[in-house]
Image: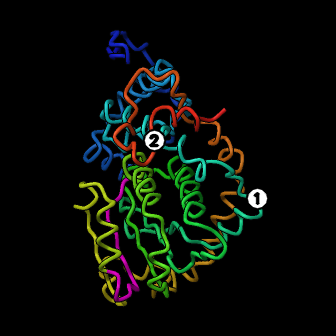
Amino acid sequence: MSVKVESLTNEVFSAPVVDRKMITVRPIPECLKRKAAEELNEKESIIAEELEMLKIWIRQSGHIRGRMEEQFLLGFLRSCKHSMERVKQKLDTYYTIRSVLPEVMRNRDPLDPFLRKVIKMGVTVPLPKTVNPDDPKIILIRGDAFDGEVCDFPDILKVFTMIGDLLLRDDDQMMICGQAAIIDLGHSSSSHLFNFNLSFLRKASILNQQASPLRQKGFHFINTPKSFDIVLNIFKGLMTEKNRKRTIVSHGYSLESLHKYFPKSVLPAELGGDLGPVQQFVDDWEQKLIDNRTYLIEEESLGVDEGRRRTTNPLAEEKDLFGTAGTFRKLEFD
């Protein structure tokens, strides 16, 4: 099969014929195959050609220094429902914003003593179970695990992206079915909630929405204080229009309300669940990050070279946050 592709320079070329048996992506169970076909427009017969087109596009872009592994690229295809133009835009945004957030994307060594303290806090905790194998995966965000005396919000976001990088590579259910976030504010005080730099939050929102291939399916807040309505309005203001239409539920202090959406079988003990203490999952993810140390450190060398860009910078409309093209050049990696 030969597929015509339009390059960045509007030259039309034909992608080479690719043997489907030669691509290095994981097989997935039938329930995920059905969901990918029905909801993500995935056609198994042309995945090899789509992946080859993406690799050609990355090589010809000139400015993107990105991963070429097929499993990684397939995650972006699924995130964008196999729309090639949307994939190109998301990949460009993914690497561009990472290039201008060195406080998040550099020094990602999970054995670094300081970073290990942040990891051990367990602010971001992927939970291992769902009711059905094609349900969205569950991510627990523990607001009161964030110790502002030890680290700042960019350090928390760094660990969040490190975990996200491994989920993108390893978790087919996550990439096909999306993720639902449970945000547990625990005993967070009002001052704790407002201890964020709004400018950085806007950058983080772009990183985690427009640039991220991890698809959100809902946001559930538990243990919310009286001042939470103000915080929720700020949270919604940082969302894309698409994410604002997702399920957003504030459960107050009611575990019973939370259990209507997430039964006890998929929750840790701290949320009235049957999975045991959350610390075991914090420890598991600490070890997984350490086991993937080389992969995570490699990410520091990836990004964009603005001096070689032939297209519009996807962050051009965010000059108030990221500055001009000249600023991008100063921040690009060596």
Q: Which residue does the numbered mark 1 point to in the structure image?
A: 112
At label 2, the amino acid type is Gly
**Location of residue 203 with respect to 138 vertically, above or below:** above
Bin the neighbour count of mark 1 within 10 Å (Cα to Cα): few under 14, some 14-19, many 20 and up.
few
At label 1, the amino acid type is Asp
Q: Residue at x 31, y 30 (%)?
A: 85
Nearest to the observer: residue 298 or residue 68: 298
**Location of residue 175 with respect to 10 vertically, above or below:** below
Q: Is residue 102 left or right of residue 128?
A: right
Q: Which residue does the numbered mark 2 point to in the structure image?
A: 323
Q: Secondary structure at mark 1?
A: loop
Please provide percent x and percent y for residue 198: 42, 63
**Location of residue 323 with respect to 272 vertically, above or below:** above
Q: Residue at x 42, y 20 (%)?
A: 310
Q: Residue at x 39, y 24 (%)?
A: 311
Q: Residue at x 77, y 63 (%)?
A: 113
Bin the neighbour count of mark 2 within 10 Å (Cα to Cα): few under 14, some 14-19, many 20 and up.
some
Q: CB atoms at circles 1 and 2 under 8 Å apart?
A: no
* Cα distance between the residues tagged 1 and 2: 31 Å
Looking at the rendered image, the quarter that the C terminus falls into is top right
Specify the segment rendered in magenta.
215-228
Mark closest to the chain's N terminus, 1 or 2? 1
Looking at the rendered image, the quarter that the N terminus falls into is top left
Decide whether residue 221 is among the magenta residues: yes
Please provide percent x and percent y for residue 88: 38, 31
User: Residue 259 — which label?
Assistant: none
Q: Is residue 43 left or right of residue 21?
A: left
